[in-house]
Amino acid sequence: MNGNIRVGSLFGIPFYVNPSWFFVLALVTWSYGTGLGEQFPNLPGASPLLLGLITAILMFSSVLAHELGHSFVAIKQGIKVDSITLFIFGGLASLEKESETPAAAFWVAIAGPAVSLFLFGILTTIGFAGHITGPLAAITAVLAAINLSLVLFNLIPGLPLDGFNIL
Ligand SMILES: [Zn+2]
């Protein structure tokens, strides 16, 4: 599979990561970790980098949740999901075949952004109502923004993403 590395399976779906994924993981860990260290000078030792790593993993988990959204609706329609792959800037759920009707295809396409919108809602609620402060609040805000961008970027028509399928 084009050099993608299999890291196991999720709900019976083979799960791959592209080698570029490790590069981005390291980059986000470093850049966001050092940013947190500057923003919160009281964080001890290597903890900003650890928080950066956790943020990076949660970021990719958000992409994965989005792809699982597409996958679960496809599976419900009897379509086999061949694989889920995480790339440098996103993910791809590879389906065995197309949905049988445009309406069915619509539900597969909308399911990913729906999951991202749901996660955005939860994270925003935690951010505003959870009385969290400091690094935790900063990380929650970043993850909320990432999930919102997963909704918006995937709904842009003309890109070969979800927006294309929804229209
Ligand atoms: Zn999507």
Image (spheres, grey):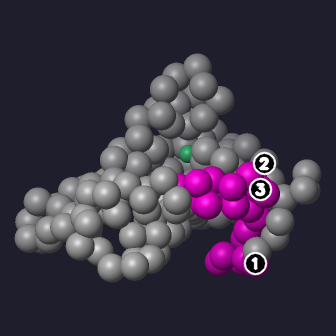
Q: Quadrant of residue 84?
A: bottom right
Amino acid beneath label 3: Asn
> Mark 2 sits on what residue?
97
| Alpha carbons under labels 1 and 2: distance apart | 22 Å
N-term-proximal mark, 1 vs 2:
1
Local packing at callout 2 (Cα closer than 10 Å; few below 14, some 14-19, many 20+) is: few
Tag on residue 8?
A: 1
Amino acid beneath label 1: Gly
Amino acid beneath label 2: Lys
Tag on residue 152?
A: none
> Mark 3 sits on what residue?
18
What x and y, as percent, mark residue 117? 34, 50
> How many numbered dots are placed on residues in this image?
3
Q: Residue at x 74, y 52 (%)?
A: 20
What x and y, as percent, mark residue 100? 69, 43
Residue 11 in magenta stretch: yes
What x and y, as percent, mark residue 105? 60, 41
Q: Residue at x 60, y 25 (%)?
A: 159
Q: Quadrant of residue 11?
A: bottom right
Q: Which residues are magenta?
A: 8-28
N-term-proximal mark, 3 vs 1:
1
SS at mark 3 in the image: loop
SS at mark 1 in the image: strand
What x and y, as percent, mark residue 120? 31, 54
Which quadrant of the rendered structure holds the N terminus? bottom right
**Relative to 65, does residue 89 appear above or below in the rendering?**
above
Residue 146 in magenta stretch: no
N-term-proximal mark, 2 vs 3:
3
Q: Residue at x 48, y 53 (%)?
A: 31
